[in-house]
Amino acid sequence: MSYQNLLIADANNVRVLTINRPDQLNALNRATIDELDRALTEAEADKNVRVLIITGSGAKAFVAGADIKEFANFSIPEGKSLAADGHTKLFTHVERMNKPVIAAVNGFALGGGLELAMSCHLRVASDNARMGLPEVSLGVIPGYGGTQRLAWLVGKGKAMEMIFTAGMIKADEALQWGLVNHVVPQDQLLAKCNELAATIVKNSPTALAAAIRAVNAGYEPGADGLQREIEEFGKCFGTADFKEGTGAFMEKRKPVFTGA
Ligand code: COA
């Protein structure tokens, strides 16, 4: 499939999706969100892709937010549908992917950019990254999940402060807050993400998908995360991966998982 605003590269069962609008600091317009939706669906269905890395093009920005120029003249219904569409097509879609998604935060991650990074399962930032939710400085609030996911990751107090001040924090502070998993020099960012991915790729795809569903369930309104864990744990016993993993342990060899 061809894309205008995305680059796609595969190696060693890892797909790197690069948002490619560097002259606009990779701002998320609706066309880019539609393309990401398609690319995620494609990656979900591709058994050769076991981990996804999402990053931004150029040395300056991961994603500098939703495209302000595109939504500046929107009406109330258009604003609401912008947020709702974004949730479905991109942010919830990433969060519910059936394989681990790592955000390689290679610079500014602001507004929708930080919201995209927070929707990913893991975040690795370059040391020049700057993160923030500046929406209230534009007269709006975070609309792509930021009011919820930031509080989940760093706690309500820090989330409120970041949203109220519209300020940016540096990568080392984000690491201290638990907002990112690792910080590395910019020229080592993709290598670090690939190193993490290579460790994950050795594990069972069916178990990884089940783990994502179980962890997410704890954050879904009305869902019982512990009950979901029990269900997902039980279902693992019916998979070929489980037979392979336990069999390999007993035969003292490395497992070869197929994701079945
Ligand atoms: N939406 C649309 N365009 C954006 C954008 C966004 N969120 N962020 C950056 N751009 C565009 C700029 O308009 C500029 O385009 P132009 O050359 O056609 O005018 C280009 O990207 C480069 O950005 P610029 O502002 O010149 O770079 P800078 O180094 O001076 O500043 C930022 C970098 C990230 C601090 C600044 O671009 C910024 O504040 N962006 C908006 C962040 C934001 O509020 N995001 C939340 C949106 S809800």
Image (cartoon, rainbow, N blue to C red):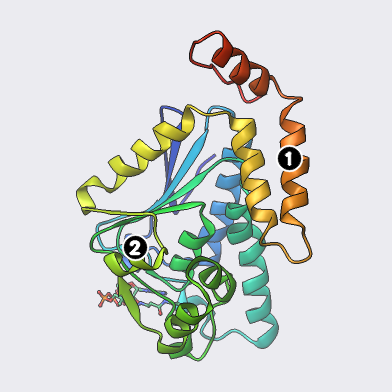
* Residue 44, image x, y percentages: 61, 39
- Residue type highlighted by circle 1: Glu
Residue at label 2?
Answer: 175
Residue at label 1?
Answer: 232
Q: Quadrant of the N terminus?
A: top right
> For the point 57% across and 70% down, which residue is it?
144
Instruction: Specify whether residue 33 is in view.
Output: yes
20 to 110, vertically: above or below: above
Disc 2 packing (10 Å; few <14; some 14–19; many ≥20): some
* Residue 15, image x, y percentages: 45, 37
- Residue type highlighted by circle 2: Leu
Which residue occupies the foreground of this view, 219 or 35? 219
> For the point 36% across and 38% down, which residue is it?
194
Disc 1 packing (10 Å; few <14; some 14–19; many ≥20): some
Is label 1 in a helix, a strand or a loop?
helix
Is label 2 in a helix, a strand or a loop?
helix
